[in-house]
Amino acid sequence: MHTDLTSAAGSRAVQASSRPTDLLAIAEWTAPTGAVVLAVHGEVDTSSCSVLHNRIDEQLRSDHHLVLDLGEVDLLCAAGLTVLVVVRERAQLRGTVLCVVARTRPVRLPLIITGLTGVLDLHLDVDEALACGRARLTSEDAVC
């Protein structure tokens, strides 16, 4: 079964094979700083992680600061963790600052258990991620 999932921006639709209960929505907006924010809602599981990966990869081609807001994610499975690691590596290769907002237990716990809290640039809210990304773009020595 294919389900169309349309971003809140309304400009693009993405498809994922999923059951009706396995929904993933990704809203995209541009912050006043010029950073692009992808706000993810729902479950990042094996049936939806390719949608997330493709959407992030799309943004890595054109943006120097990308914020991935996982604040409304209800489930982050191993495949989703792999996506985060892969896109982090691509972001580094492309010179993109990738900031991940992870404030809820369903997201933070898998990151803590796997040790990815020391690998990903994690933040508790979008404003913090935007400020950190802006600082890192202007100074390579910036630590957030």
Image (cartoon, helix red, strand yellow):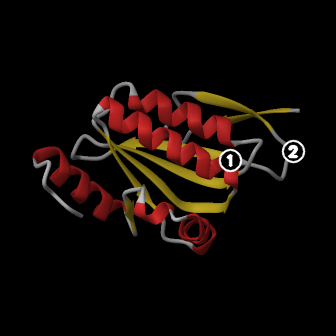
Q: How many marks?
A: 2
Q: Residues within 10 Å of mark 2 (few under 14, many from 20)?
A: few
> Residue 68 location, x and y as percent?
45, 50
State the residue position of label 2: 19
Q: Quadrant of residue 54?
A: top right
The residue lying at 23 percent from left, 46 percent from top is 32
State the residue position of label 1: 79
Quick check: 100 left or right of 114? left
Residue nearer the viewer, 128 or 87 = 87
Residue nearer the viewer, 92 or 123 = 92
> Residue 70 location, x and y as percent?
52, 58
The residue lying at 48 percent from left, 70 percent from top is 103
Task: First in sequence, mark 1 or 2: give its number.
Answer: 2
Q: Amino acid at mark 1?
A: Ala
Label 1, label 2: how far apart the Cα atoms are: 17 Å
The residue lying at 43 percent from left, 43 percent from top is 88
Q: Amino acid at mark 2?
A: Arg
Quadrant placement of the C terminus: bottom left
